[in-house]
Image (cartoon, helix red, strand yellow):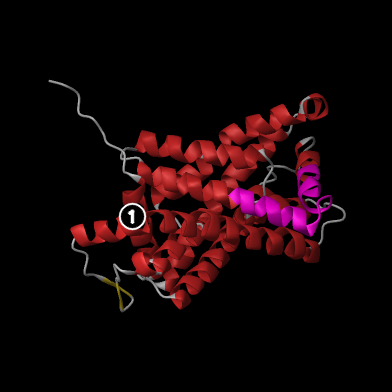
């Protein structure tokens, strides 16, 4: 008897599922969205901690900084795998999911923006919890040379680059992160999902791009350890604002709107074939939305 073949989803099917997931996320109770965001923030913080620990290699930082950054990038994607496989909400992924749902008229704009806000706040709460309680009072990075690497890493991200530079890196980051979400949904088994998630995530970390939720660990951790030249104001202005704007564009425009546009007609046909008549938050699914919009 031949082994059963596991078929991957087509891009059209993935866009359909992305919109369905976005509508479901956008209409979930606010308290559940918040705690889901907290969970995602915590899980990503652990992966960020692994990157900081891996990057603590003074000799390599001097002689092969690109190589040690690549090694850190290889291990970081386990954070996004845990988030996606457990169904937790990362605001950066939501920028794609809910955008597609809105464009397919499965979700209202107001519900989308509310979901973004609540998820962002949950991510921040979870990240800061791990930074302060687990890493901070647990003194994970208090000893040298770990402390020096945490401070140097945050300084390279916040003090050296300009606002526009961080903004552009934010676009590249979430373009790749949402691609990881897209490819992760394309797989039908856990192994294929993990592979799909892993490599785009590896790419953004190896290139040094900026992820607004990852920065919720990297920068506050350095501040907790007394990093000079990094203040709350600087973090908000250069660690949150440009990164968040870039992430919104990277996920919402370069992934969400792009995939909706490319597969709108086929997705509308798929909705008809599946006989979808459900509603999201009182908004009827309009199968013509992708055709005429």
The quadrant where residue 292 appears: bottom left
Q: Is residue 54 left or right of residue 8?
A: right
Query: Can residue 186 be found in the magenta stretch?
Result: no
Q: Is residue 81 rendered to the left or right of residue 202? A: left
Mostly what secondary structure, the magenta segment? helix
**Badge count:** 1
Q: Which residue is drawn at the image coordinates 41% and 75% (left, top)?
A: 108
Q: How far from the left and from the top, in percent, is residue 206?
A: 65, 36
Crowd tier of the residue under label 1, counting other residues whose Cα lies within 10 Å: few below 14, some 14–19, many 20 or above: many
What x and y, as percent, mark residue 278?
A: 24, 70
Residue 84, compared with residue 282, is above or below; it is above
Residue 268 visible, this orientation: yes
Which residue, as the protein is rendered here, is positioned at the far right?
229
Considering only vertical position in the picture, is 185 above or below 206? below
**Depth check: 262 or 35 in front?**
262
Decide which of 74, 113 is in the foreground and name it: 113
Q: Nearer the viewer, residue 44 or 90?
A: 90
Asked if residue 131 shows in the view, the reply is no
Question: Which residue is rendered at x = 36% and y = 64% of the image?
Answer: 290
The quarter of the displayed image where residue 186 is located: top left
Q: Secondary structure at mark 1?
A: helix
Magenta stretch: give its range.
151-173
- Identified at 55% across, 53% down, the residue is 42
Q: In the image, is 200 to the left or to the right of 206?
A: left
Name the quadrant of the N terminus: top left
Q: Measuring from the top left, give residue 201's x and y in whole percent.
A: 55, 41
**Residue 14 appears left or right of 99:** left
Q: Which residue is mark 1?
A: 17
133 and 106: which is toward the camera: 106
Q: Residue furthest front?
A: 292
Q: Residue at x 36, y 47 (%)?
A: 11
């Amino acid at each position: 008897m031949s082994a059963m073949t596991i078929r991957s989803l087509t891009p059209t099917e993935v866009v359909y599922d992305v919109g369905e997931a976005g509508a479901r996320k956008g209409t979930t109770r606010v308290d559940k969205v918040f705690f889901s965001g907290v969970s995602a923030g915590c899980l990503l913080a652990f992966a960020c901690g692994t990157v900081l620990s891996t990057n603590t290699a003074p000799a390599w930082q001097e002689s092969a900084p690109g190589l040690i950054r690549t090694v850190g990038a290889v291990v970081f994607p386990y954070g996004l795998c845990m988030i996606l496989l457990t169904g937790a909400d990362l605001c950066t992924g939501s920028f794609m999911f809910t955008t597609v749902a809105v464009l397919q008229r499965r979700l209202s704009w107001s519900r989308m923006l509310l979901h973004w806000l609540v998820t962002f706040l949950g991510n921040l709460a979870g990240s800061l919890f791990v930074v302060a309680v687990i890493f901070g009072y647990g003194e994970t990075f208090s000893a040298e040379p770990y402390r020096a690497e945490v401070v140097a890493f945050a300084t390279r991200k916040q003090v050296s680059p300009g606002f526009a530079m961080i903004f552009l890196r934010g676009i590249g980051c979430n373009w790749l992160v949402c691609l990881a979400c897209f490819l992760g949904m394309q797989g039908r088994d856990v192994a294929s999902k993990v592979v799909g998630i892993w490599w785009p995530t590896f790419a953004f970390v190896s290139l040094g791009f900026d992820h607004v939720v990852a920065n919720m660990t990297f920068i506050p951790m350095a501040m907790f350890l007394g990093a000079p030249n990094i203040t709350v104001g600087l973090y908000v202005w250069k660690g949150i604002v440009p990164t968040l704007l870039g992430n919104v564009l990277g996920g919402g425009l370069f992934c969400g709107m792009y995939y909706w546009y490319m597969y709108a007609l086929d997705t509308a046909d798929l909705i008809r074939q599946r006989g979808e008549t459900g509603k999201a938050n009182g908004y009827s699914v309009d199968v013509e939305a992708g055709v005429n919009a």
